[in-house]
Image (cartoon, rainbow, N blue to C red):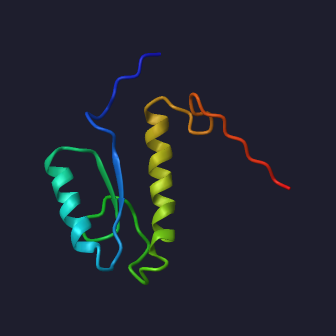
Amino acid sequence: MDRVPRYRYTPVVMMRLMDGTAATVDALAEELREQKIALHLCGGPHGSLPWLAEDDPATAPITMLVPAYRMIEQTARASGFDPDRPPRLSKITETF
């Protein structure tokens, strides 16, 4: 099966926290959008992924991961990949 790339570049997933890095992340996100790079931003006023709340910068990354991982899975499947069986990678999980 031939896969046709949906994007010119690899999509970017960014996490924006309410801390001293927020302005830098906002500026980078704007630059990526101007370059027409597929951007999935979690957090902040221009976020494209759902986010629970802006409570505490220490716990915000945890709440951001759920929508980010859902988007990654959906993008992989839409591109014809099975995220549970990636090509050239063996995923092994052992529980003791």
| Residue found at the far right of this picture | 96
The percent position of residue 10, horizontal first and vertical second, equals: 33, 39
**24 vs 75, nearest the viewer:** 24
Q: Would residue 79 appear left or right of 93 to someone viewing this image?
A: left
The percent position of residue 2, horizontal first and vertical second, equals: 42, 16
The percent position of residue 24, horizontal first and vertical second, equals: 23, 68
Q: Residue at x 33, y 28 (%)?
A: 5
**92 vs 67, nearest the viewer:** 92
Q: Residue at x 81, y 53 (%)?
A: 95
The relative height of residue 37 versus residue 77 in the rendered view (above or below) is below
Instruction: Count how many numbered circles sit on residues in the image.
Output: 0
Q: Would residue 17 appear left or right of 89 to someone viewing this image?
A: left
The percent position of residue 45, horizontal first and vertical second, equals: 25, 71
**17 vs 40, nearest the viewer:** 17
Q: Would residue 96 appear left or right of 11 to someone viewing this image?
A: right
The relative height of residue 55 versus residue 28 in the rendered view (above or below) is below
Q: Quadrant of the C terminus?
A: bottom right
The relative height of residue 92 versus residue 50 in the rendered view (above or below) is above
Q: Residue at x 29, y 79 (%)?
A: 20
The relative height of residue 10 versus residue 29 in the rendered view (above or below) is above
| Residue found at the far bottom of this picture | 55
| Residue found at the far left of this picture | 34
Q: Residue at x 46, y 59 (%)?
A: 67
